[in-house]
């Protein structure tokens, strides 16, 4: 079973995403907004894909506050985790944001909140899962 790591500071959102992914997608989920934990899970291979909230209000790494873009950049720059697919999730989707966020972060995909179409949400994630 594939595992999705949900990096999200809103517990309600994290719960909703988790429910959709387990019920509809048949996927396992982990959730954290702790950056050290995200990196550790990514490096250990415990997640097959990461769902990364762009605006993490409380996440801090090495004394600096970081957002999902920054964490994605760190993971993509690390040879150990560079191959791990990351999908950005954001509520602040203006025209052109998507391209900017993807370019800045090196992420593999982009989903805007709120998630209305649950099946499409699952499909977008499973499409980027490594097939083995």
Image: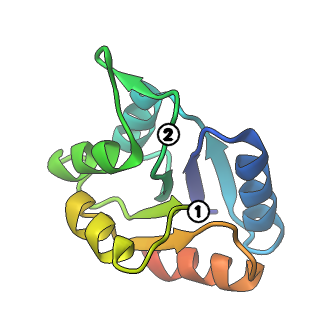
Q: Position of residue 63 (x, y in %)?
A: 31, 14
For the question of whether residue 121 can be seen, the reply is yes
Q: Is residue 40 above or below residue 126?
A: above
In the picture, the quarter occupied by the C terminus is bottom left
Q: Is residue 90 above or below residue 102?
A: above
Q: Which mark is residue 10?
A: none
The quarter in which the N terminus is drawn is bottom right
**Closer-to-camera residue (116/91):** 91
Where residue 77 sits in the image (x, y, percent)? Answer: 15, 48
Query: What residue sits 75% from the left and 69% below the top?
Result: 26
**Which residue position holds label 1?**
2
Displayed quadrant of residue 121: bottom right
| Kind of element beneath mark 1 | loop
The residue positioned farthest toward the front in the image shown: 94
Would you call the spot at circle 2 few (<14 residues within 10 Å), some (14-19), or many (20 or more)? many
Residue at 53%, 72% (x, y): give it. Answer: 111
Front-most of residues 123 and 67: 67
Labelled disc at residue 56: 2
Q: Position of residue 90 (x, y in %)?
A: 52, 61
Compared to residue 34, the image places residue 14 above or below, namely below
From where the camera sits, is residue 132 visible?
A: no
Q: Tag count in the figure?
A: 2
Q: Is residue 66 left or right of residue 119?
A: left
| Mark closest to the chain's N terminus, 2 or 1 | 1
Q: How is the model colour-coded?
A: rainbow
Residue at (37% x, 74% y) in the render: 98
Q: Left or right: 82 with respect to 31?
A: left
Tell me the element at label 2.
loop
Q: Is residue 95 above or below residue 80?
A: below
Question: Of circles 2 and 1, which is in front?
Answer: 2
Mark 2 near mark 1, Cβ–Cβ under 8 Å?
no
């Amino acid at each position: 079973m594939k595992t999705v790591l949900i990096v999200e500071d809103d517990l309600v959102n994290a719960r909703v995403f988790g429910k959709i992914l387990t019920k509809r997608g048949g996927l396992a989920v982990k959730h954290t907004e702790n950056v050290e934990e995200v990196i550790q899970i990514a490096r250990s291979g415990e997640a097959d894909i990461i769902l990364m909230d762009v605006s993490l209000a409380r996440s801090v790494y090495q004394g600096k506050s970081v957002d999902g873009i920054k964490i994605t950049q760190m993971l993509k720059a690390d040879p150990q985790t560079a191959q791990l697919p990351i999908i950005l999730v954001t509520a602040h989707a203006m025209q052109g944001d998507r391209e900017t966020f993807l370019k800045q972060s090196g992420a593999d995909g982009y989903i805007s909140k709120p998630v209305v179409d649950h099946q499409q949400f699952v499909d977008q994630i499973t499409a980027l899962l490594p097939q083995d």
